[in-house]
Amino acid sequence: MTSCICLGPKRAGKTHLLKALQDPDSIDETSYSMPTIGTGIYRIHFPTKSPNGDKPRPPPPPTDAAAQINIPHGGKNLPKSIQILEIGGSMAPLWRQYFEDVKKLIYVVDTSNLCQISAAGVLFYSILTEPRLQKVKILLVLAKMDYSYRQMRNEALLMLQMSKLQKQIRQQVTIVEASAVTKVGLEPIYDWLQRP
């Protein structure tokens, strides 16, 4: 049973993003990821806030028993980590087989590749119409923002028809701009993943 899955077209930046969430220092301008053939499992440990105002840092990976312990936050217990199943873009025809018991879904779109955005939109629409995903929380990640120019965000949202789509769907969709290389957008993703 996987409560969170990560989907997106081939070469959208899913693996790079998940590796950056696992260890922000492991990704830089020289990092390279091979396209995922099949699936990959990532354990993301949420950063702890530093009392002296320093940048939040992910804690070292705890033992399996410690990973299950929740920390109190504002009267609520929040998890210290989450396991995410990445399913390769080449497996899009088989994605439906992984939708059972999913609570959260991350969908990654490469904003630096305008040619891919329309195809990404078609795949995204098919996910939104899936009956088993009608109550799933969705995070739409506009990835590779370090390679694209500022206006591409708006173009990507127009091409995906997000303003029209959000009026017609049941799911709650959160949109985040992110870059695994510059670390922009990682903190909102951590926050979204940690929320119940």
Image (tube, rainbow, N blue to C red):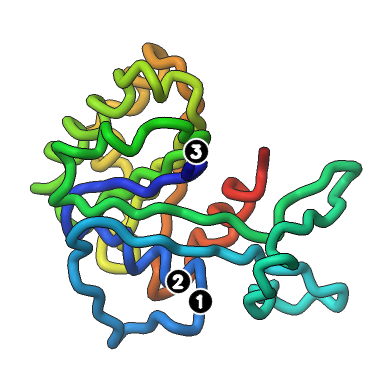
Q: For mark 1, does the 10 Å Cα neighbourhood hold few (<14), some (14 to 19), or many (20 or more) residues?
A: some
Residue 111 seen by the camera: no
| Residue 24 numbered mark, or none | 1
Given residues 79 and 57, the one toward you in this image is 79
Q: Which one is closest to the eye, mark 3 or mark 2? A: 3
Give the secondary structure at mark 3: strand
Query: Which quarter of the figure has residue 107?
Result: top left
Identify residue for label 3: 104
Identify residue for label 2: 20
Mark 3 belongs to which amino acid?
Lys
Mark 1 belongs to which amino acid?
Pro
Give the secondary structure at mark 2: helix
Query: Which quarter of the figure has residue 15?
Result: bottom left
Where is residue 194 drawn, in percent x and y?
65, 49
Mark 2 belongs to which amino acid?
Ala
Seen as rendered, the residue at the extreme left is 115
| Residue 16 numbered mark, or none | none
Q: For mark 2, does the 10 Å Cα neighbourhood hold few (<14), some (14 to 19), or many (20 or more) residues?
A: many
Residue 88 seen by the camera: yes
Query: Mark 1 and mark 3 in contact (Cβ < 8 Å)?
Result: no
- Left or right for 115, reference 133: left
Identity of the residue drawn at 19% across and 48% down: 9
Query: Vertical placement of 158 versus 41: above or below?
Result: above
